[in-house]
Image: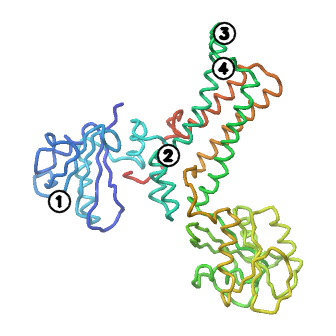
Amino acid sequence: MNFETIAAISTAYGTAGISVIRISGENAISEFNKIFKGINLNTVQSHTLHYGHVVNEDGSLLDEVMVGVMRAPKTFTAEDVVEVSTHGGILITQKVLERILSLDLRLAEPGEFSQRAYLNGRIDLIEAESIMDLIHAKSEQALKIANLGIQKETSKLIRNLRSKLLTIIAQIEVNIDYPEYDDAIVMSKEIIKPKTLDLIQDIDELLKESSKNQMIREGVKTVIIGKPNVGKSSLLNALLNEEKAIVTEIAGTTRDTIEAYININGITLNLIDTAGIRETEDIVEKIGVNRSIKALNDAVLVLLVLDQSKALTKEDKELLDLTKDKKRLIIANKSDLPKALWMEEVVSISTITKYGLKDLEKAILKLLSLEDIEQRDFNYLSNVRHIMKVKEAKQSLQNVLASIELNMPVDVYAIDLTQAWRSLGDILGENYQDDLLKELFSKFCLGK
């Protein structure tokens, strides 16, 4: 596979001790050697570091650098790679990059180094996506998930399922193509059905645990709702331990949604404090209420706040009904006041005294089935693309069961079994098309 030689800055934009410019391609070493004053890089051994200078076109010194030379195939891209460590100023880094781009190479596109690593067989798509997950991880648990992907442990889960599918498909194909082969197992529906059910069970377990990993990786979209003046903004401030939202005794103070992030025992909650949901003639408040309803519809977790010092109102009952099908916690605020609200299965708190906040955090983790996170096995999927492909595979297996119930010929089963195998292959990048690859890697950092 022949690619143009490419280059890009691989470190973050800004002032730092050093910046690193990565060059990859067949001519990476020979091209950079043209502007390097020091040892002849064409003759050095692989994976060695060399001191020298990048020179301008007129031969004057541009910057003092350290240059790492790595020869194919034992590099990230499986191509020849040069990594130039320059001084970390914004201007000098840009000048060195411009000098490199004056050679017979071009600026890399976002994610192109990782894309080449994938196309050259160095990594699969799970590993590639896990690299970006590692960069963007917001918790230790998210780091663990990303590292399992990079270490191929997550890929093994998918390869194991594909291997089981392939065994069934191959045995069916042998029956079809070589009916005279006496030693082959005759793959009847009585044999295929339990094997398919076992695969569906494996997938169900994978999906159940992967949904938890997805919450750990992406955070949990959490909306705080309630009628005006029950203490939604006070709860947000109490959880953050800062005055993020304006709090007054005037109902309707919050006119728009306010977003913030908190970390509870390694789980990130993407908190959204909403305007109080009620009937209003105020145009601005009405817009806020509509946004609150949209946030509620999009949320994974709902924190419904009630006023413990008052009996349930019509608005409270409407919110209870509106959220009954959501994953929700009912929070009874203002426990520091005389109690007038009697309900079961509520978390009693006071945003004034901070009473009950630790119990609330524990209740959130329990509701999300993430209270045992320290002992958790993180080797499951977390990427929404991967999870959707596993669901596609499950649907194909369910189609097999439907065909069995209809007493269809065995070769019909092979069609859906093969489709399940291909859907799982899409996760690894076995069957990916060029346009889909381009879209996926375009989300990566420039220089990665």
Query: Label 1 belongs to which residue?
Result: 63
Q: Which mark is residue 179?
A: 3
Q: Residue at x 30, y 40 (%)?
A: 74
Note whether residue 5 is visible: no
Image position, residue 133 (x, y; %): 49, 55
Please, what secondary structure does the residue beneath circle 1 have?
strand
Using the image as rendered, state which of residue 163 and residue 338 is in the foreground.
163
10 Å neighbourhood of mark 2: few (<14), some, or many (≥20)?
A: some
Q: Which mark is residue 99?
A: none
Work out which quarter of the rendered image holds the N terminus and state it: top left
10 Å neighbourhood of mark 4: few (<14), some, or many (≥20)?
A: many
Q: Residue at x 85, y 87 (%)?
A: 310
Please, what secondary structure does the residue beneath circle 4 have?
helix
Whichever of labels 4 and 1 marks the residue nearer the N terminus, that label is 1
Q: Is residue 125 above or below residue 448?
A: above
Q: Residue at x 40, y 47 (%)?
A: 109
Q: Which mark is residue 172?
A: 4
Q: Residue at x 86, y 68 (%)?
A: 321
Please, what secondary structure does the residue beneath circle 2 have?
helix
Q: Is residue 198 left or right of residue 57?
A: right
Q: Is residue 304 above or below residue 34?
A: below
Query: Label 2 belongs to which residue?
Result: 153
Between disc 1 and disc 3, the foreground one is: 3
